[in-house]
Image (tube, grey):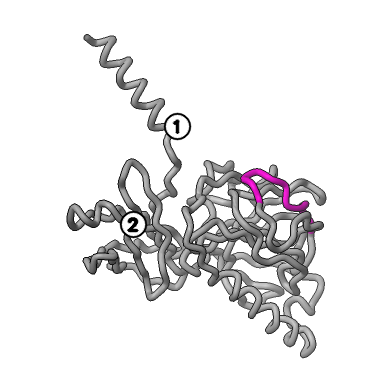
């Protein structure tokens, strides 16, 4: 009987480890809340609900006949109770609460040699405004399809800068770091974290050569400071496919990949969607 119980435990463990990978629930500013949506009736069990947070639609993922809402939490969110709204085609509605925990992010001071990348000229500002509109169109894209979120690490390298750092360029305060930096030699291959469609690509003032990939339902990955881009807008990309190489274009201090992820139009920490990373002593979580 004892051996049978052990065998059963091992089988359950193996089957669970092979199941679909759910994102990590970490409801902090810049993090993710993974909320199980309870069924309201027999009829709602037969349909996929729609969910919203701060008027932005949320991705819905499913495992073992259970629906989950994937909630990206903005960095500026204060700790305390928050709510999402859920609705079904039959008119049923639900308000689902969750609690945001406090998190303090460290400061980071960087010296940028190209002073225009810190204090742009009038011509630079005109370019930046045009690029901002392109970026906004990309991050607000919604495709009503199954979500692909079983992410892989996109490049072989060292995590050199984590998400959320309060940044100072040449002692001047700027926006917090809204991605994950992985340092690697220039030319190192960059792989797509998951399958999807290229929805934006090109050379941007601050971000250098950059690519956006849509993974469905507002889940979008971004790859910046690339040396070369190997894909174009409209390309269908497979998980692990090379999309370019590591570089040091745009506003940088050395060669690296800047990986960012959007969920419900919100930049979130990519770590919560990636396999465990080796973090250096300067990149604690």
From this view, report whether residue 111 is shown above or below residue 45. below
Q: How many C-alpha atoms fall within 10 Å of the one at disc 1: few (<14), some, or many (≥20)?
A: few
Q: Is residue 238 magenta?
A: yes
Residue situated in front as seen by the camera: 148 or 12: 148
User: Which of the marked residues, 1 or 2, is nearer the chain's N terminus?
Assistant: 1
* Element type where label 2 sits in the image: loop
Residue situated in front as seen by the camera: 48 or 271: 48
The circle on residue 179 is none
What's drawn in magenta, residue-wise? 237-247
On the image, the x and y values in percent for residue 118 come to 73, 78
Q: Name the residue under label 1.
A: 18
Q: In which quarter of the view is residue 102 placed?
A: bottom left
Comparing labels 1 and 2, the label whose residue is closer to the camera:
2
Q: Name the residue under label 2.
A: 48
Q: In this view, does 209 lie to the left or right of 270?
A: right
Residue situated in front as seen by the camera: 194 or 272: 194
């Amino acid at each position: 009987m004892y051996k049978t119980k052990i065998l059963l435990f091992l089988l359950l463990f193996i089957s669970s480890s092979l199941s679909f990978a759910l994102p990590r629930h970490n409801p902090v500013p810049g993090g993710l809340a993974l909320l199980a949506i309870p069924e309201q009736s027999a009829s709602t069990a037969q349909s996929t609900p729609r969910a919203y947070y701060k008027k932005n639609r949320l991705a819905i993922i499913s495992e073992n006949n259970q629906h989950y809402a994937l909630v990206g939490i903005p960095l500026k969110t204060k700790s305390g109770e928050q709510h999402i709204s859920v609705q079904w085609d039959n008119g049923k509605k639900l308000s689902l609460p969750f609690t945001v925990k406090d998190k303090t992010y460290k400061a980071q001071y960087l010296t940028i040699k190209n002073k225009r990348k810190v204090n742009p000229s009038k011509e630079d500002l005109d370019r930046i405004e045009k690029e901002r509109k392109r970026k906004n169109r990309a991050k607000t894209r919604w495709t009503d399809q199954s979500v692909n979120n079983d992410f892989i690490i996109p490049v072989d390298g060292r995590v050199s800068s984590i998400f959320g750092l309060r940044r100072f360029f040449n002692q001047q305060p700027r926006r917090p770091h809204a991605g994950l930096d992985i340092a690697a030699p220039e030319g190192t291959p960059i792989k797509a974290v998951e399958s999807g469609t290229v929805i934006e690509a090109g050379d941007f003032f601050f971000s250098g050569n950059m690519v956006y990939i849509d993974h469905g339902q507002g889940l979008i990955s971004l790859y910046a400071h690339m040396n070369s881009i190997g894909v174009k807008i409209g390309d269908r990309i497979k998980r692990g496919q090379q999309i370019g190489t590591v570089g040091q274009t745009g506003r940088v201090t050395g060669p690296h990949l800047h990986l960012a992820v959007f969920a419900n139009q919100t930049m979130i920490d990519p770590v919560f969607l990636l396999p465990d990373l080796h973090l250096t002593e300067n990149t604690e979580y």
